Amino acid sequence: MTKFQMNPEVWAIGILRVAAMFSFAYASSTFAKDSSVNFRSVDVKSIEEAIADASAEDLRKIEIKIARLMQENPADLSANYLMSTLLLKMFTLDPGSYSLIRQSTELAAQTYDLDQKSDLAITALANILEATGENDRGLSLLSDAAKRGVTLGWRASLAKARLIFNGKNADAVLGILNETLADADASTELIAPTLISAILSRYDGEQQINELRRWAKRRDCFHLELALANSLALNSHYDDAMAVYKRILAVKPDSTEALMSQGIISLRHLKQIDLAIQKFKLAAISAKYPSEKTAAQTHLALALIGQKRDFAAANKASVAAISGASDQEGVLFAILAAYRKNADTQFTMSLLEELEKDVPGLHLAHAMKGEILSEKLGRYSDATRSFTDAITLEPGRSEYYNGRGLAWMGIGNLNNALTDFENAAATNPDDASARYNVACAQARLGQKEDAMASLIKALEMDARLRSNARVDQDLMALRGDPAFKALMDENAKQVRVAH
């Protein structure tokens, strides 16, 4: 019998919408720490930087504030530009929301209609064209604007750098950005992502570190410092990387990426597990995006499991990581692998039981519990119930039927076992293990001809099962059959069973 095995397998806001939002109490945004700050007093660049660094929740807060400006003055050029920029950022976070790119485009066009010689208007349109893959049209737009005498500032230069960047022309991009940063008013934080991408595509190893360090010295910039620290870590300069991350956190203590990176270095390379746990906890608290929070909680869970001291805390972190993950099965597989390496069966079972309670729709947890009950603890009746729960939640997984069939075999209920193995084979006709298990159940039920036919089919699908078949006690009834002996000979011609 083969074991149970899992397969790892434009208008920005309408007046009604704005009116509805006015009844809410708004928290302060990243660029206005005090909610009493007059939004009009904030310069466009600060708001752009806030948009670029904002989570989805922060974007909604900023959206409300910009919408208020637009309601007060629909012809406000800066407000139209900022709303177009914000909606474009929302679209990058949720590319399936085509209404966002449509609304952003319409606002960019409206900005252009308000002032066709405005650097903001030209940049808004260029950004839309870059986001929609129309880079040549974007470059033509910038070229035509220059010919018309439009004074293009650092935003348009940044747009041009992004429009021409294809990973192979980093030197040209770096040249444009070098001139862009010569403008004292230019935002290094907005320019940095394109600058960093060009540097990473152009340089490797120590050259990459030196280039990032050179640009970072030119202007203070969080993103450049972070890229430098990451490059140091990737090139095994762990102490230097930790020092740069520490410098970053002194200024921005809630930097999830810096905290996560410090935790990973501490865990994997410096072997400072307690420090790693501390950093992952802080990262989970500071995370703005769901994916960041899940990553921090997953690393925290793995570190706690490796620590082998506090499995209650490890369970708590594991449940939090799995429940919030977009790929719950992938996170569960990683965490269970760590449990199997570092914990006993009792702790693994306690995690799966907590998942049954807190993440009730996670069919994989029920199946993995069934596997442990069946193969580790010999509690076959309990195992059949766990696999039944898994099958109820996800009837399309052949391995779940296989697992329950094995549990039925443990009890001695061969008819139920055969039914489940046949269901597994029907659910996934390419599952050789299911077909092999059908042969085993048929052999034990005395259905020798059917068993031979099923076994031949299984070996045609996966010849490696032959080594199982030679010693499998479930196939004892077939051992005296010349056809079985011939089938076990790897050099024998294909054996067929007459019906």
Image: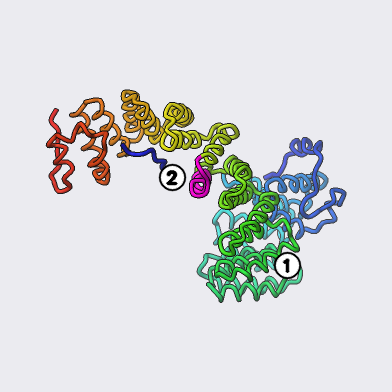
Residue placed at 36% from the left, 32% from the top?
406
Identity, as a three-letter code, of the amino acid under mark 1: Ala
Task: Tell whether position 338 is magenta.
Answer: yes
Residue placed at 59% from the left, 48% from the top?
301
Query: Does residue 156 show up?
Result: no
| Quadrant for the N terminus in the image | top left
Q: Which residues are magenta?
A: 331-345
Q: Which numbered disc covers residue 8?
A: 2
Q: Residues within 10 Å of mark 1 (few under 14, many from 20)?
A: some
Q: Residues within 10 Å of mark 2 (few under 14, many from 20)?
A: few
User: Along the horizontal axis of the image, is 454 left or right of 138?
Assistant: left
Q: State how far apart marks 2 and 1 are (Cα).
A: 48 Å
- Label 1 SS: loop
**Which secondary structure is most common in the magenta stretch?**
helix
- Image x and y of residue 399, in percent: 39, 36
> Nearer the observer, disc 2 or disc 1?
2
Which of the 4 quarters of the picture holds residue 12?
Answer: top right
Nearer to me, 238 or 370 = 370
User: Along the horizontal axis of the image, is 481 left or right of 120?
Assistant: left
- Image x and y of residue 62, in percent: 75, 48
Residue placed at 80% from the left, 43% from the top?
26
